[in-house]
Amino acid sequence: MATEQRTIAATGNGIVAEAYRQIEPDVICAYPITPQTTIVEEFAKFVAAGKVTTEFVTVESEHSSMSACIGSSSAGARTFTATSSQGLALMYEELFVASGLRLPIVMVNANRALSAPINIHGDHSDVMGARDTGWVILFAESAQEAYDQTIIAPRIAEANLLPVMPTLDGFITTHAIARAQVVDDAVVKDFVGTWKPEHALLDREPIMVGGFANLGNTYMKIKAAQRVAADGALASIKTIADEWAAITGRPYDHVEGYGLEDADLVIVILGSAAGNARTVARDLRASGRKVGIVKLRTYRPFPTAELAAALSRAKAVAIMDRSDSFGSFAGPLALDTMAALYAHDLHPQIRRYIYGLGGADVKLEYFRHVYDDLEASLSGAADPGLTYLGID
Amino acid sequence: MSSNNWDVSDYENWTPEEFPVGMCALAGGKAVEYITGSWRSMRPLWDKDKCTNCLICWVNCPDSSIKLQDGQMVGIDLDHCKGCGVCVTECRFEALRLLPEHCDEVKCSEGPVLDEAAQPSTMNPEV
């Protein structure tokens, strides 16, 4: 039975900051960057007002913020930060250190374009640059999903000893005022519990972190253990998310489908644009077309089997990426999706799209166009190749 | 796990699961057991008679390989000295010299000091 909840109206970032307040991490080391800034700005107000006991460490860059998080987490503190775009890019080397040391750091990312040219608006270029860093990566479609995934994040991180990056789309989700249901502080506190690592730098028994594995195959064995942990996190995320869903009544699935019971034409998508995709799918279904969408909430670890199952009856699949992997066959989501299809011996028609870079509008007509392309693919139309939507 | 009973002697044969998560070391001071001296290609040789016990070598040694007893230099820890030569450079009394690792100490006792070490034809008595 779901617990009693309050409905609040706030920006996506305000709602994430509220989740941070309710979790009340031991330490936050953060540096401002658009469009993440208002998360840590709001949290700093909670610290100043004495609403939380969190140690708030202001640093001089994101390189320092992730470095400070690594130190803090190694010391045994539940450690959070938040970032975006160039900030995430500046953290790049530390992202691997955090995951390699198996530190359960939580960092919300406000997904944003990368320079150059400079652009502060939403797309997935930043987070996709982190997809192979060993972090768990989650995508929110809405402020509500951002709230829920932020609260389950420390549990996922600590259960698997992996850093977790819950993400929401810059401006579209971070800055638009949305409605969300939030639970009481005590419910969140009870859900996240307290964090006591098995080993930490500040323990009485000394340990050392940051060891050296340069000779022989020790490095490779450590990475093999990390691979096992990353794969294992998939089941763990679902278990923890289900526990939270039992409290809130809001289910979480790695792969969330719409219309899949009979859809021949399916769009695969991440993040906020799933809302527009679903709106178009709903309208087309009302006029009798067999269309559907698949939205992934978990991106790393990649839910290969779940995605393949969701696409198992689709005749044509369009994968829509909000970032490009320049020079490769398709955007990152398409590459992962095609690998999942191949691994499960599924061979629908495939179409590849890039949309919404640098916050470009994601219009409803784009999705109608994509479904038309999929329909045509079933009548033998040639694959036009990777297509940038909305630039002509 | 106590720092006293964490045995890493067989770590090369550990499976991935046997390593501590994230490869943290479950005890301090384990570097003592790692014989970095095996990396060495050049070896410092200490001349006790020229040594004034100023300890500038001890201050500068990056591997804590200058051995002291009661505040007096007593030799070099060749299990951990990597042969970097910092001690030889810093010594103001020519009490330390750098010799090729394979060189016999007695035969090389008249060998040149560090700044000439780059010339193997004069360094290596076998050439």
Image (tube, coloured by chain):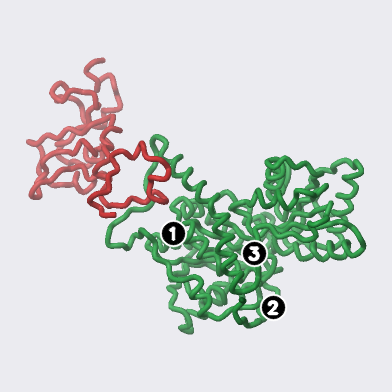
Chain colours: A green, B red
Q: Secondary structure at mark 1?
A: helix
* Residue designated by label 3: A252
Residue B113 in view in this figure: yes
Judged from the image, the secondary structure of the residue bearing numbered disc 2 is: strand
| Numbered disc 3: secondary structure | loop
In the image, farthest residue toward the front = A1
How many residues crowd around disc 1 within 10 Å: few (fewer than 14), some, or many (20 or more)?
many
- Label annotation for residue A70: 1
Which residue is label 2 attached to?
A: A179
Q: Quadrant of the C terminus of chain B?
A: top left
Q: Is residue A38 visible?
A: no
Q: Residue at x 26, y 32 (%)?
A: B115
For image coordinates 70% across by 76% down, the residue present is: A178
- Cα–Cα gap, marks 2 and 1: 34 Å
**Lateral position of residue A142 relative to residue A201, left or right:** right
In-image side of A90 versus B93 (left or right) = right
Q: Around disc 3, counting alpha carbons within 10 Å, would you say few (fewer than 14), some (14 to 19), or many (20 or more)? A: many
Kindly indicate the quadrant of the structure image that contains residue B77. Answer: top left
Dot placed on the residue nearer the N-terminal end, 3 or 1: 1
Q: Foreground mark, 2 or 3?
A: 3
Tell me whether the residue at label 2 lies in contact with that at label 3, contact meaning CB atoms closer than 8 angstroms: no
Q: Which amino acid type is shown beneath numbered disc 2? A: Arg
Q: Is residue B6 above or below residue A280?
A: above
Query: Can you tell which of label 2 and label 1 is closer to the viewer?
Result: 2
How far is mark 2 from mark 3, CA to CA?
18 Å
Q: Nearer the viewer, residue B56 or B43?
A: B43
Tell me where residue A177 appears, x and y as whole percent. Answer: 70, 77
Q: Chain of mark 3?
A: A
Mark found first going from the N terminus, 2 or 1: 1
Quadrant assignment for the N terminus of chain B: bottom left
Which one is in front, A257 or A83? A257
